[in-house]
Image (cartoon, grey):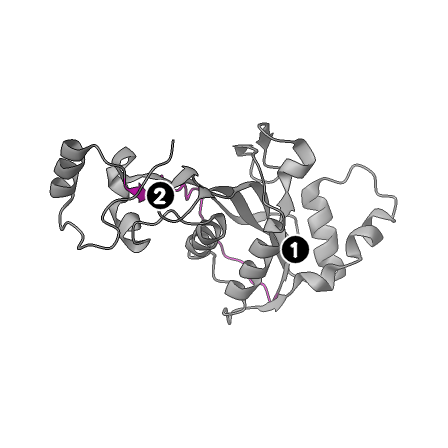
Amino acid sequence: MIRYPVACHTKYIKTVGWLALLLLITGLNYSCSSREVLPDTSSINFDADKVLVLQFRNMTRIYGENKSVRSPLTGIYFITGKVLEGSEELLTRKLVSQLKERSDFMLLPPNQAKGELSQVLSKNIKGLSEKNLIVEIGRNLGADAVVTGNIYRFRERIGTQHSVESPASVEFEIYLVSTKDGMLLWSNHYVETQRALSEDLFQLNTFIKRKGRWITAEEMAIAGLESLLRTFPEL
């Protein structure tokens, strides 16, 4: 069913009460976001002079769609879905761009890790977990910590900013790992499928911020990444 956001270019109603009343009377749909998940942030006492960024991994490519997959580092379960081509590069690039603004550590970009994975695997170390692989690559490059993540869903909207048959949907996680002892220093994840405002009145602020539009998966993912990184610890 095609859904249309209404009054995207008119004055916004000032109170949730009036908006709720209007929705009940008209039964019309407004585009907005569903609930975002921002769990498990923590304060840490850890000094890191150099932080390596590794490229995000496409978990749907590994496990297939509609699979319940347990995060290899956080233990949280995710349901895989379609992942748009190039999503790993996009999120990695935006992650580097955001972390470059930090002054409390030196950032080592992903291109410095090219070839390191094959070198680590060539050591004939069998059964290395993902965490241990990350730690080995980070140590080889002289990093004190490594930040990377996994993408479980990155589905583009079907439709336009004014009407959609299927909204954008993203699901990904980020984590920071110490190369000293493999400790998980920080993690966070973001899950969102855009919904009509009539389905979730609590997202009025997001609806206004997005000007009543159905946004793209890229817009959603970038906004989600920025919100997660607000909890990224001082190092």
The quarter of the picture where the N terminus appears is top left
- Judge whether residue 142 can be spotted in this image: no
Residue plotted at (50% across, 68% down): 102
Q: Residues within 10 Å of mark 1 (few under 14, many from 20)?
A: many
Q: Secondary structure at mark 1?
A: loop
Looking at the picture, tell me which residue is in the foreground, 197 or 157. Answer: 157
Badge 2 crowding class, 10 Å Cα cut-off, few under 14, some 14 to 19, many 20 or more, is: many
Q: Report x, y in % for residue 52.
A: 64, 60
Residue 91 found in image quarter = bottom right
Residue at image location 28% in from the left, 41% down from the top: 30
Residue on which disc 1 sits = 54
Horizontally, is 6 left or right of 220 in the view? left
Nearer to the camera, 94 or 73: 94
Element class at badge 2: loop
State the image coordinates of residue 114 (x, y, percent, origin top left).
Answer: 76, 59
Amino acid type, callout 2: Ser
For the residues labelled 1 and 2, say whether their Cβ atoms are less than 8 Å apart.
no
What is the number of the mark on residue 11? none
Q: Position of residue 105 (x, y in %)?
A: 56, 68
The type of residue carrying mark 1 is: Leu
Q: What residue sits 73% from the left and 58% below the top?
A: 139
Magenta region: 30-50
Q: Which residue is mark 2?
A: 33
Dominant secondary structure (helix, strand or loop) of the stretch shown in magenta:
loop
* 119 with respect to 188 (left or right): right
Q: Earlier in the sequence, mark 1 or mark 2?
A: 2
Residue at 16% from the left image edge and 42% from the top image edge? 19
Residue 232 in sight from this viewpoint = yes
Residues at marks 1 and 2, CA–CA distance in whole angstroms: 29 Å
Give the residue furthest to the bottom: 103
